[in-house]
């Protein structure tokens, strides 16, 4: 990645000295890149989600290990997105809890969960349409800013520094996902595939520990899916942990390190892709049914 | 693409981008009056922008003195007083624009903050009031502070509501303030407060400069306040705060999930809007010199909202224009003043049809150093600069070097 970076947009002294920088370092110089691969970064414990009489999630337990790409799959209506929403604070779980680095996320408002390090994208794209691509990303970066109304009104030096560094980092992120030349377009004018990429850049901008992607390949053709797989791998290689909800089995099998399978809100399997492919329960629940859009 | 290793362009993207450029270009040509003002403005180099701004400000200051023929409201209404009133409405619109235009919170009770400011100024200066008296100019910050307090009091319980519900609650709040002014004995209902204070200073003959009958000094004071408030609002707009507001307006849930403390920033929008409303109320009370409960009805709230929508929701310059127009039209065309709501109603409908983004539909610029960032990015894309379909290609000429945010999307295709 590093040889493609252009030093003139980088503020850091490191880059001026010609030191190679991964995107994670350029985008978030303060974060401690996960070196300890393998311990449980996120623990989902007995998560249950009930809507009236309907149990959308039933006692689901799984871990997301540091540095892995975990796939979360299941047939339509299996509760994948519900699980996502319960994890990121959109829904309040009926019972069970979600721990990030051992600390419970229960009861925190959504923006605090994001600041703790759990960022997500949306299944149906939800960008800020009247903002440019760069501004969208900078909104995500703002989560790490310290100054607020006072600093902005008086244009304090700290505020100006933060603004400048946010723009640099925003451009670096856009470049990373490959849409830097569209930085000044309103996001609603961007082509569909670019919007998806912009969502990923915006989520990365919040400097997450775990990046949750909700069907990022929906509506993509095979070539685009291939590119996306490359992007997801690069993100993981830069030190992020990725949770991927996906429908497309080929994509999931190709990119994930481990897969959790849900069916009717219950976890039915949790293994490496090779074993998932041979798991009779998964085959009967998911792969075996010809009606499902299995690629 | 400048990155060699980044993911490749998606197939089909280039052609789509060109069609998107064409779409924007079409929107420009069909724009009608004022079309492209924002776009051309953004294309100008900084120095020229400052030059034009200074000229506009000088003209604005001279407006009551030159009394331009045809535009003037005389003989029906004193032109100086008309100018003072226009400036106060413009200030109100700038404040309401923060709430409605930026944060997208439909506030139908904005007149309440205006009333709070007026009563603060009146009760702290009028001889009719039994309370402590302070010099008039001190009532301006006092009015802002009291209005901010009311903004917090109203905002914290109600800003958990959204959309229509918020509009109804603010509507109720506006009425509550008016009714309180009627029933609380200390606020003297319809009798009101006479001889509200004014700033100090006398002319050569010893008469005070700031008379209720002389509009020009009040106009100058208010225009100065407007300029300061607009500069501060601009600072907020091009910062984390402005971005948070626009993000909330665009998609509140997504904003929250991207780490924006939406509730906090909604309260901020409300409070900042309230403070400007209070300030304009205090100026209004000083200029008119008399405050009672008759001026703060729902209809006035709607008129304020009308000013913002007319001018261009979210654009502070548009808000000034809208506010001034809303005050100006009934004063200029006295024959139709009785029908002003009918006319504003029709005007709003027409504007919604032909210019749904208002008279001056400029997009907010949300990055303080965005212009140089975009330029740098374009500079790094050789071949893009001159190539067809490049963002800077629309207007040619100087635009290539100064697209800033003034790309084809600046005016936006409002759909």
Image (tube, grey):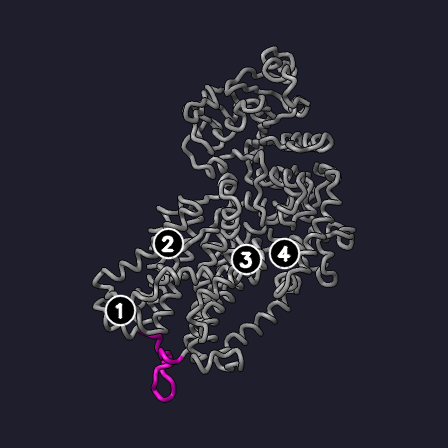
Dots 4 and 2 on the same chain: yes
N-terminal-most mark, 4 or 2: 2
Density class for disc 1 (Cα within 10 Å; few <14, some 14-19, many ≥20) is many
Residue B103, image x, y percentages: 48, 51
Q: What type of secondary structure mainly makes up the magenta span?
A: loop
Instruction: Read off the chain for label 2.
Output: B
Residue bearing mark 3: B352
Find numbered disc 1 in the image and state the secondary structure of the residue it sits on.
Answer: loop
Residue B396, image x, y percentages: 74, 61
- CA gap, disc 2 and disc 3: 23 Å
Density class for disc 4 (Cα within 10 Å; few <14, some 14-19, many ≥20) is many
Residue A170, image x, y percentages: 61, 45
Find numbered disc 4 in the image and state the secondary structure of the residue it sits on.
Answer: loop
Residue bearing mark 1: B192
Q: Nearer the viewer, mark 3 or mark 1?
A: 3
Q: How many marks?
A: 4
Residue bearing mark 2: B171
Where residue B410 is drawn, which disc sits there?
4
What range of the chain is rendered magenta?
A: B197-214
Instruction: Read off the chain for label 4.
Output: B
Q: Nearer the viewer, mark 3 or mark 4?
A: 3
Q: Residue B395 versus residue A286: which sits nearer the camera?
A: A286
Placement of B313 over or under B78, stated as above or below: above
Residue under the point 40% across and 66% down: B280
Find numbered disc 3 in the image and state the secondary structure of the residue it sits on.
Answer: helix
Dots 3 and 4 on the same chain: yes
Dots 1 and 2 on the same chain: yes
N-terminal-most mark, 1 or 2: 2
Residue under the point 49% across and 28% down: A101
Q: Residue A235 versus residue B36: which sits nearer the camera?
A: B36
Dots 2 and 3 on the same chain: yes
């Amino acid at each position: 990645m590093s040889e493609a970076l252009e030093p003139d947009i980088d503020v850091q002294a490191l880059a001026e000295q010609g030191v190679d920088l991964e995107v994670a370092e350029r985008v978030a110089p303060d974060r401690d890149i996960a070196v300890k691969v393998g311990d449980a970064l996120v623990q989902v414990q007995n998560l249950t989600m009930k809507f009236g009489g309907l149990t959308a999630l039933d006692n689901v337990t799984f871990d997301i290990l540091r540095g892995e790409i975990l796939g979360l799959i299941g047939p339509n209506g299996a509760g994948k997105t519900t699980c996502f929403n319960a994890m990121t604070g959109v829904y309040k779980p009926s019972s069970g809890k979600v721990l990030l680095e051992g600390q419970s996320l229960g009861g925190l408002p959504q923006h605090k969960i994001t600041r703790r390090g759990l960022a997500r994208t949306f299944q149906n794209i939800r960008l800020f349409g009247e903002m440019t691509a760069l501004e969208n990303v900078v909104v995500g970066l703002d989560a790490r800013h310290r100054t607020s109304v006072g600093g902005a009104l008086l244009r304090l030096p700290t505020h100006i520094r933060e603004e400048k560094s946010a723009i640099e980092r925003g451009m670096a992120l856009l470049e990373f996902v490959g849409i830097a030349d569209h930085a000044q377009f309103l996001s609603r004018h961007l082509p569909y595939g670019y919007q998806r990429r912009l969502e990923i850049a915006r989520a990365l901008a919040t400097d997450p520990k775990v990046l949750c992607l909700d069907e990022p390949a929906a509506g993509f053709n095979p070539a685009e899916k291939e590119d996306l797989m490359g992007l997801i791998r690069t993100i993981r290689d830069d030190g992020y942990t990725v949770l991927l909800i996906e429908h497309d089995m080929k994509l999931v099998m190709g990119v994930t390190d481990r897969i959790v399978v849900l069916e009717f809100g219950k976890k039915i399997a949790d293994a490496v892709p090779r074993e998932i492919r041979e798991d009779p329960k998964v085959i009967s629940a998911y792969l075996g049914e010809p009606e499902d859009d299995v690629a | 693409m400048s990155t060699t290793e980044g993911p490749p362009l998606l197939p089909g993207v280039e052609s789509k981008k060109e069609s998107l450029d064409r779409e924007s270009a079409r929107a420009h040509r069909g724009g009608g009056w004022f079309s492209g003002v924002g776009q051309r403005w953004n294309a100008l180099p900084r120095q020229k922008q400052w030059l034009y701004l200074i000229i506009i400000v000088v003209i604005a200051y001279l407006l009551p003195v030159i009394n331009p023929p045809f535009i003037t409201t005389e003989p029906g209404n004193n032109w100086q007083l008309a100018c003072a009133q226009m400036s106060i409405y413009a200030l109100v619109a700038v404040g309401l624009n923060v709430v409605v235009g930026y944060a997208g919170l439909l506030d139908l009770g904005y007149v309440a903050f205006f009333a709070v400011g007026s009563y603060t100024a009146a009760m702290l200066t009028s001889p009719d009031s039994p309370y402590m008296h302070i010099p008039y100019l001190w009532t301006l910050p006092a009015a802002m502070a009291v209005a901010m307090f009311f903004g917090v009091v109203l905002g914290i319980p109600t800003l958990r509501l959204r959309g229509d519900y918020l509009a109804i609650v603010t509507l109720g709040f506006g009425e509550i303030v008016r009714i309180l002014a009627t029933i609380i004995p200390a606020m003297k209902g319809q009798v009101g407060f006479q001889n509200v204070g004014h700033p100090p200073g006398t002319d050569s003959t010893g008469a005070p400069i700031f008379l209720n009958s002389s509009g020009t000094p009040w106009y100058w004071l208010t225009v100065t306040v407007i300029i300061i408030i607009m500069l501060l609002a601009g600072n907020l707009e091009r910062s984390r705060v402005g971005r948070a507001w626009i993000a909330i307006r665009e998609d509140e849930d997504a904003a929250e999930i991207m780490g924006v403390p939406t509730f906090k920033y909604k309260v901020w929008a409300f409070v900042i809007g309230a403070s400007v409303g209070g300030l304009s109320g205090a100026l209004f009370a000083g200029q008119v010199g008399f405050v009672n409960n008759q001026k703060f009805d729902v209809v006035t709230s709607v008129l304020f909202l009308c000013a913002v929508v007319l001018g261009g929701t979210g654009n502070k310059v548009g808000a000034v224009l809208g506010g001034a127009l809303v005050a100006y039209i009934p004063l200029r065309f006295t024959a139709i003043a009785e029908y002003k709501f009918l006319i504003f109603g029709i005007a709003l409908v027409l504007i919604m049809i032909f210019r749904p983004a208002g008279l001056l539909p400029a997009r907010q610029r949300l990055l303080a150093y965005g212009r140089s960032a975009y330029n740098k990015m374009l500079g790094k894309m050789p071949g893009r600069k001159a190539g067809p379909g490049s963002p800077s290609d629309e207007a040619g000429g100087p635009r290539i070097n100064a697209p800033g945010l003034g790309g084809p999307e600046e005016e936006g295709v409002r759909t």
